[in-house]
Image: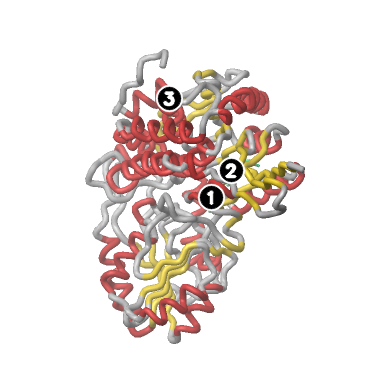
Amino acid sequence: MSQPMLTADTDPHRLARTLGGRNLVGGELRPSHTGRTFAVFNPATGREIGQAAHSDAGDVDDAVAVAFRAQPAWAATAARKRGALVAECARLLASHVEELGRLVALETGKALRTESRVEASVVADALQFYGGLGSELKGETVPFNPDMLTLTQREPIGVVGVIIPWNAPMMLMALKIAPALVAGNTVVVKSAEEAPLAVLRVCQILNQLLPPGVLNIVSGFGPDCGAPLVAHPQVGKVTFTGSVETGRIVARTAGEKLIPVTLELGGKSPMIVMDDADLEQAVAGAVSGMRFTRQGQSCTAASRIFVHRAIHDEFVTRLKARVDAMKMGDPLDEATDIGTIISRGQLDKVLGYIESGRAIPGAQAHECSRLPDGEALRDGLFVRPVIFTGLDNASRLAREEIFGPVTCVIAFDRYEDAIRMANDSDYGLAATFWTRDLKTALDATRRLNAGFVQVNQNIVVQPGLSYGGVKQSGLGREASLEAMLDHFTHKKTVIFNMN
Ligand code: NAI
Ligand code: MG
């Protein structure tokens, strides 16, 4: 290591000012080739906190060329050594958790205590997990012919393009870059325009240990920076998390190039609560599952809650009481449970859904918690959580991903109806089922169309567990050993003819 180690800077305002405006390519922070930048805002105040490099196809070309040149030496490094380096990155990041938590809270509006600090520690956890998997990149011997030695080996794909959104930017990036790197690929990340700073800082920290050019990151907008990354001829694989709409565009380009693509898209995840469920446990699970602390900005948010009619009213009363008790406020304040929506555009989209829901005859919008007061947060992008009742599963609010603090509680009479409604969706990312009857639970886990089904709990993606969706929720799996093997390597078959 030639340069001194970065020291953690827990003043996110200073960090945002000093860090921004640049990409990280070949181990160095550098401006975009045009020198253009764009502003990054604090959604809790509406104020600018820093700048990010406004990169275009030229910057993508540079970053991919650097990653392409660095790839053969990285692939030739022993797999366990690559893993060991990634694990060392995890330990280094662990000493930056507070700093990264504050920075991501500042740029995304996610509360520090309930969300942002947690996200920062999950990043280290994901790197730690994959760091241990270097020696699992195994092949097989195949009994093809007794006079031949036939084997398979796992080889890296080459340069991987990583496109991430803003809702959990560091965590989603970590779940992509860690397996890509351990498998021997080099990486170019395109950050989300709303949250380019904390991920840049993560990459800067990791570049203290990784060889230059192995992990690169550029910031910019979708069409002028993300699209050229997907289209670049030297990018051999793209992994994307974001909207269905953009996922289709990415898949179309990948289809033209005939390269593999992993897509983690939206969700409209059902939660089914039977009348014998532990009610208090289920209500707590609805609060955490709906990710109210993240303003519902999660692809697995429990945004359709089917509750048996016998307990429906009691469930709603208790759910409302719990969400009412949550405090909305300054994301950096330790007392805050719920921060802000990411951007004005997302805020308008969420408010639009709430308005259209109110207009539906029979629907009731239960608004919870209280907007923060005080001059400083006057322009903050706060939305009170809303629990809708009296909606039909066919309504727009129950079909489309709102990506805000809005959930629908829908009553059902029969188990069969609940399963049918839960599966009647374009999405299939996650589902949860709440009961004390394990026989019914087993049946439900078999019948629910989703990539991740949990009984009597609703936890988020965990390193080690395959994660991904069916239907419009995406293609491929993340977060596990198989995700690394299936999505970041090619399998080569080799035959030695010894006759
Ligand atoms: P988006 O899918 O447009 O953006 C995600 C990433 O893709 C960003 O880095 C963006 O710059 C990039 N991108 C946009 N257009 C691109 C293109 N043509 N080629 C390559 N990259 C491109 O999502 P957005 O606009 O931030 O949010 C819209 C909706 O998407 C949300 O309301 C939510 O419903 C959903 N969403 C789902 C997420 C998930 O975790 N599955 C995460 C973020 C958004
Ligand atoms: Mg978009």
The mark nearer the N terminus, 1 or 2, is: 1
Pointer 2 residue Cβ closer than 8 Å to ligand 1: no
Q: Quadrant of the N terminus?
A: top left
- Estimate the x, y position of residue 393 in percent, counting from the top left: 52, 74
Q: Which residue has dot 1 on it? A: 483
Nearer-the-camera pick, 156 or 417: 156
Q: Which residue has dot 3 on it? A: 209
Q: Which residue has dot 2 on it? A: 488
**Relative to residue 145, is residue 200 depicted above or below?**
above
- Estimate the x, y position of residue 6 in percent, counting from the top left: 35, 21
Question: Is 315 left, or right, of 450 in this rendering?
Answer: left
Nearer-the-camera pick, 12 or 148: 148
Which amino acid, mark 2? Phe
One can see residue 155 in this view: yes
- What's the distance in space between the residues labelled 2 and 3, CA to CA? 22 Å
Q: Secondary structure at mark 1?
A: helix
Q: Secondary structure at mark 2?
A: helix
Residue 111, picture quadrant: top left
Evaluate if marks 2 and 3 touch, with contact meaning CB atoms under 8 Å apart: no
Assign ligand 2 to one image quadrant. top right
Evaluate if marks 1 and 2 touch, with contact meaning CB atoms under 8 Å apart: yes
Which amino acid, mark 3? Leu
Q: Residues within 10 Å of mark 2 (few under 14, many from 20)?
A: many
Q: Residue furthest left?
A: 335
- Estimate the x, y position of residue 109 in percent, counting from the top left: 38, 42
Q: Secondary structure at mark 3?
A: loop
Question: Is 456 left, or right, of 359 in this rendering?
Answer: left
